[in-house]
Image (cartoon, rainbow, N blue to C red):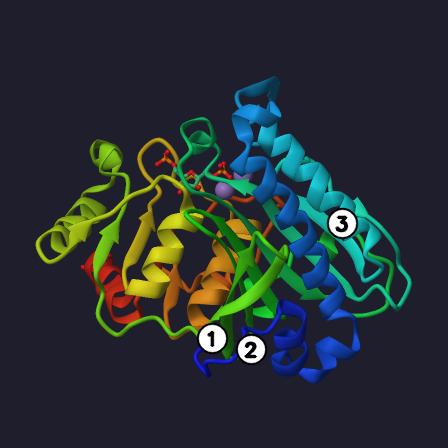
Amino acid sequence: MSDSGDSPRTLADVVADTAPADLVEDGFLTVVGAIASGARRVSDLTRRAALAGMLGDIGEINVQGEIVQVLDAAGTDAFVSSLRDCGAVAALACEELEEAVFVSDRADHPYLVLFDPVDGSSNIDVAVTIGSIFAVYRRSDDAPVTDASLLRPGREQCAAVYVVYGSSTVLVVATEGRVDGFTLDPASSEFLHSHEQIRIPSQCAAYSVNEGNQGNWHPEMQAAVADLRADYGLRYVGSLVADFHRDLLKGGIFLYPGDVKSSAGKLRLGYEANPLCYVAEQAGGAGSTGSERILDVQPEILHQRTPLIVGNADVVERVVAKLAE
Ligand code: AHG
Ligand code: MN
Ligand code: MN
């Protein structure tokens, strides 16, 4: 039951009522519906993975230099199809595809979507929580869409969406000033309103980092994490969306720093850091590279990597201050 005790409302109904009117007028519900459609498909494949031939890899390396898992490819197909065919998306970019997909320059296709179809791929084969992440922008004008149209700072997002395929499948939608969660009901296949106006709790409950990389961190990052270790327990799933969703609902801070091997770290700005930092900020949190607000970074390339520190704003600020000492 939702907070009011009535039967929970559907994703479409709540977003129609709560998203900014101009987005709704310009087809935002169609974009959310396309994401939800792909998410139902990925959730079903995830739940049946071994039985659906979704384990292991396809023997190819993607643009990230990573081995493509079978579910990565299936998730890419599901979301590319639903977003390309929905009738409101002008172009899309996907972690698994080197180049953007240009759909239409028509004025009635005002949206651009950058996405990570399956986040946490190393966890697929061991049945640990994975996710999908989407950054949504409006075209800045009616000019034909080009690669440059997709290189927008995260502060220009009009919305962000992520899905976490965990003990339940939860789809989270953030628009200006509001974050809501919807749980997939297996009986009806509807995403039903289950988390109303999410705000990150004031108290940080845990820090989340791959401590196994500690030897590669720069000294100031080692000091900053030691400072967190003194005050908080450690939680680390190894799927960004799972760690982020826990921190959003319970309070926490997630870090994937740059290190001596890779100054930009591992995570991607366009479809991991930007959408999740947009969600965090709309829920009262913050996201930083360690030296600047993630949402202010001007991307230079589509698959750009960035260091990421995201979660409770006061703790993000504490880490940034420690790094500056
Ligand atoms: P993806 O599966 O989309 O490549 O993302 C994996 C990312 C992210 O989900 C997670 O936080 C991080 O990889 C974990 O990296 P380590 O295994 O190096 O900790
Ligand atoms: Mn990812
Ligand atoms: Mn991925």
User: Looking at the image, which is closer to me, 307 or 104?
Assistant: 104
Q: CA gap, disc 3 to disc 2?
A: 24 Å
Report x, y in % for residue 83: 75, 52
Which element carries disc 1, helix, strand or loop?
loop
Which of the 4 quarters of the picture holds residue 141? bottom right
Q: CA gap, disc 1 to disc 2?
A: 22 Å
Q: Find disc 1 in the rendering and name its residue.
A: 2
At label 2, the amino acid type is: Glu
Q: Find disc 2 in the rendering and name its residue.
A: 176
- Seen at 60% across and 50% down, the residue is 300
Query: Local crowd at mark 1 within 10 Å, few (<14), some, or many (≥20)?
Result: few
Ranked by sequence position, the earlier of labels 1 and 2 is 1
Looking at the image, in which quadrant does ligand 1 appear?
Answer: top left
Indicate which label's residue lies in the foreground, 3 or 2.
3
- Locate residue 262 relative to residue 70 in the image: left or right: left
Beta carbon at label 1 within 8 Å of ligand 1: no
Beta carbon at label 2 within 8 Å of ligand 2: no
